[in-house]
Structure formats: C-alpha cells, structure tokens
Amino acid sequence: RGARRAAASVAVLGTAGALVAALAELAAGGVETGITLLGPVPTGAGVVNLDLRADRLSAVVAVMVAVVALCVQVYSTAYQHHDPRYRAYAATVSLFTAAMLLVVQADDLLLLLVGWEVMGLCSYLLVGHDSQREAARRAAVKAFLTTRVGDVGFVLGTVVLLAGAGTTSITVLLRPETLAGLSPATCTAAVLLLVAGVVGKSAQFPLHTWLPDAMEGPTPVSALIHAATMVAAGGYVLARLLPLVATAPAARATLAVVAAVSMLGAALAALAQDDLKRVLAWSTISQVAYLLAAIAVTPADLGSAPSVLHLLSHAGFKALLFLAAGALAHQVHTTSLAGLAGSWRRAPLVTVVFTIGLASLAGLPPLSGFWSKEAVLGAAEEAGGWTGHLVLVTGLVTGLVTAVYATRTWLLVVPGAGSGDGLALVSAGGGAERAADGDLRPPEVGAAGVGLLGPVAVEVVEPVPLAMLAPLLLLAVPASLGGLLLLGPVVPGAVHLSAVTGGLAAGLSLIGVVATALLARARPDPVLALAPRLRGAMAAGFGVDAATRAVVVRPVRALAGLVAAGDRDVVDAYVRGAAASVRGAGWALRRTQTGGTTGYLTWLAVGAVVVAVAGVGLR
C-alpha cells in the first residue's frame, strides 16, 4: 500500500511539475527560444541538431497535454484503486506524457521521432494493461502493428528531408530559403510520407481500425490517447510543419480526401454503436479528421490556427467525455449503452458535465466545439477550390450526423430512453456484465424485498470518488468556454469566422438534436429507424476491418507460414543433416573404442605391419 501511494504521488506531482513548466513557457509570451542539447552533429547525409524549441504553439499545446495528463493521473488514483499493477500503469502513463511533450517541444525531426515511437510503445503497454484478457492483448498488438505501418512512412519522410535539405532541424527546414531550395518532387514525396505516418498515428482511414479496439484498455488511458497524446500527435506535427506541407499541393489534396472520408465515415459508424467507449472512439476518428482537414485546406496566411484551435477544443471535451464515461461505468460496471441507462438518477453531477461534453461534441453554440469546427469550416470556405468545397460540405454533413449520434447517446445514457429504471436492462437477467476494466462482476444489489410480482432488487450505487469528480469539473470549463478563450491571442495565427458557415453549422446541429429527440419518442433507440443491414454495416465500420483482415492480415500470415515452413524444412534440413553426419561419424568411431586391451594390441600390430609394408614399398 505504501509503494502504491508513493507511485501515485510521484506520478501526480511529476505531471503537475510539467504543467507548471508549460504554464511558465506560455507566460513568457510566446518568445521563440531554442535549447541546444547536443549541438550540431554532422552525419554523412547532413547535420542533425537534436534541439528543443519553445514558442507559442508548443507552449499552448504543452499546457493542454499537461492539463489532460494531470487530470488522468489524479482520476486514475481512484479508478485504478484495486489494480495490482498500478505502479507500472502510473509509470507508463508518465512516460506516455513525457513522450508527447518531447514531440511538442522537439525542434529536430529525429528527436521528434524518438517521442513519436515511444508513444507507440506506451500505447501498446497501456492498451494491453489488462494482459490476462485475450481481447486486450489482441487490441494492443493490433494498435502497435497498425501504427507501425504508418511509422515506416514517417521515417522515410524524415530521410527524404535529410537527403534533400541536409538537415533535420525543423527551424531550418521551415525557412523560406530552405523550402525554396527543395524540388517540388522532394517536397511532395516527403509530405506524402509524413502524412502516411500521421494517418496511422491519428487513426485515419484506412489505418483507423486499431482505435475502436483499443477501448479494451482502461478508460483513463483512452482519455489520454484520444485527447492529448498519440491521436493528437499527428495533427500537431502537421500543424508545426504547415509551411512545408503548403509546398505540396498534391499531398494536401490527398490529406483532404482522407480527412473527408474519415470524418463522415467514422461519424456514421459512431451512430450505430451500442457501447459508449466505442461511440467515443469513432467520434475521435471523425473529430481528428476535422483538424487534419483544416491543415489540408487552410490558406497560408491563416497559419495553423484553425487546426490548433480544434486540437485544443477536442482535447477538452473528449477527455471530459471519456472520464465521465468511466465515472458512470464505475457505478454499474459496464460501458454498454443499455447498462448505463438512467445515469442521471445515480450520478446527477457527472451527467451534467457529460451533457456539456456531448453538447460541445455536437457543435452547439456557444460551447467550444462550435467555435473550433466553425474555424475549420470558415477556413475551408475561404480556401475555395475543390478541396475546400469537399471539406466544407463534408464538414457540414458530418456536423449533422455528429449531433444525431451525440443526442442518441445522451438519450440512451442520461434519461435512459425506453429503459424504465436505469439498471433494468442490466439486472433483469440476473447475469454479470463486463466491467469497464474487463472483469466480470455481478450487478450491485442491496436490500431485497417482495413485490406483487415477486422479489425486487434494490440498487446500491457507489458514490463517485472526489479524485474522479474533480478532474471532470476542471475539464468542463474548457469544454464549455474554451472556444471563446482561445479565439484570442493564445492560438498562433488567425481565425476567420464566417456568419454563413457558422449559421449553417449551428442550424444543422440543432436540426440533428431535435430530429433525434422526436424519433426517440416513437422508439427507444432512434437508430432503429434505419434498415437493419445498413445498421449492421455502420456498426462494423463499413467492413474496413474485415477487408483488412482478408486483404492484408491473412495473406501476410500465409506468407509467414510459408517462410517458417521453408526455414524449417529447407534451411534447417542442411543443419540437421550436418548434425546427423557428425553423429554418424562419432558413432562409427565409438565402435572402434571397445576398451579391451586385446583389441588395442591387435590394431597396434596391424598398424605396425601397414607402416612396415609401406616403408619397404617406398624403398
């Protein structure tokens, strides 16, 4: 118990120290400062600097990362209270946070790549934290391997830039004279490869399938991955490298198409999920696509402001939603929408902040989600062209779908549409529900009485611990007011708001909310209005995961089996043959060693005769 408290103290205080340092960096007023670690290191291909950088962009994102990480660490002291591996968990979360902060502060692509890869390792460890469950182990391996596919592109993109510019320094790479010296082909190839890495890390189509399965990890880990690390890292890197990205129109067009497909497809998939964490996972894919779309279309004079604004806004309301989901699941030991029905009766304060998070996700004014999405849509409108129009139209339609699934989630979880008494769907069968942390636990039952129709179970509700409630109240502030605060000078660059796109976005969101509420009056779950086959396709993510298994996983496994058979039956055959030959020779020689004196004297005599005869013959 003492070791656990010490681990919690180190984790919380260490993260709090990182937050203080980030706030000090932000308070410095965004003065650009370079921090040399090893100095210029000449290589055969160019110069590697391994420097850090402090400016307004890194400062504001570092504050966001530290705030979310601190909330997760404090929250985890209660949520993971009975975890026998809490010390390893807290240490890995701390390493995860440090890796993301290294990505944020790095002024060298190789140094950034170190943090980038450490995050991949930490995600593997945390998603598979509950390692006794096969589902968690499979999800961890899937996340690790899928993101590694994209990381190959990121590494190759870094190599292309090093070969073309002779340096990996981000500051040097983004100088106008350096960009002017790079050929269009080099810029396009480098940006496309970097985008491939971002697509994997930020869970965008077609490398998005790992993220919904990663919900097998603890809920606080999901909050950290979705809001402040891993998934957010890709958007930050492209925002940092925006001047380079702007030199490759073909790569930006590719990014716009990928973002549009991810944005709308993931929103439709979220609409048909029956598990709260999977709803939020698909919504993350959709929302991250907004900020990547902003990078794809934002005019150069606006800078990275629209994408960074949505990055910060999304971090606030998504961390709030995941931690609120964990608090609700903590009481009923399930994350299924049916099991969470009627949550307002059990945890009214948690459902209030949960409602704020969903409203911000839906883009309802004046919450932060509305302002950040409007910044993205305004940038798309100003950009024009087919990519700008693609992002604008897709963003508006996605906003409507987002409002629909956010309202559906609220109706099923908070009042429990059609569920009667909140836990009726969980306890009616008397069975066990899968807990948020993967364990199977029976429903909480208190006193029992006898009614007209038989025994009646009385629900006993666990109160939400203060360590879990306090982070929720803190995160509710940026989720509700963050958009207004960040429209000021905090975000580097300019944000252009459009009354037309803002009105359309708000109107479509309100239409989605009202229409879903009206549908819920006729049927418990509004999504039942869709055709069953369509619902099934949406719930399965339109079959992308199955297609990936058929086209990639099975052929790779078959090839691996073929290679293993060749190694076993061909390559190893020579090794086994040589070993058998040596054993045979040894056996034959061993037969001559009988241990009898008579035998040895006989062979000695034979040898002497042979030598004598040979000597006579030589004369």
Image (cartoon, rainbow, N blue to C red):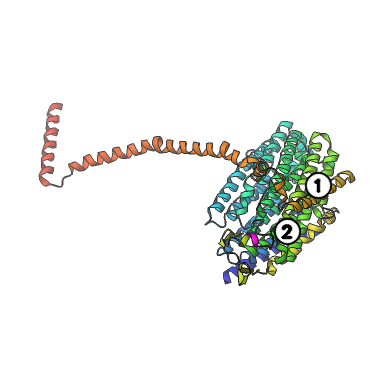
Residue 585, picture quadrant: top left
Q: Is residue 513 left or right of residue 200?
A: right
Name which quarter of the figure residue 197 lies in: top right
Q: Is residue 60 left or right of residue 102?
A: right
- How far across and down, in percent of the image, does residue 581 sit? 29, 37
Main secondary structure along the magenta-highlighted residues: loop
Picture quadrant where residue 543 is located: top right
Task: State whether residue 310 is above or below residue 592.
Answer: below
Q: Position of residue 6 (x, y in %)?
A: 61, 69
Q: Quadrant of the C terminus?
A: top left
Secondary element type, mark 1: helix
* Range shown magenta: 416-425
The label number, if any, that marks residue 306 in the structure image: 1
Which residue is at a point 60% across and 44% down the rendered structure image? 146
Q: Amino acid at mark 2?
A: Leu
Q: CA distance from mark 2 to mark 1?
A: 21 Å
The answer to whether one can see residue 213 in this image is: yes
Residue 68, position as x, y percentages in the image:
71, 59
The residue lying toward the viewer, choosing from 310 and 249, is 310
Q: Taking 538 as reference, is 463 above or below it?
A: below
Say which element carries label 2.
helix
Q: Position of residue 175 (x, y in %)?
A: 78, 41
Name the residue beneath numbered marker 2. 320
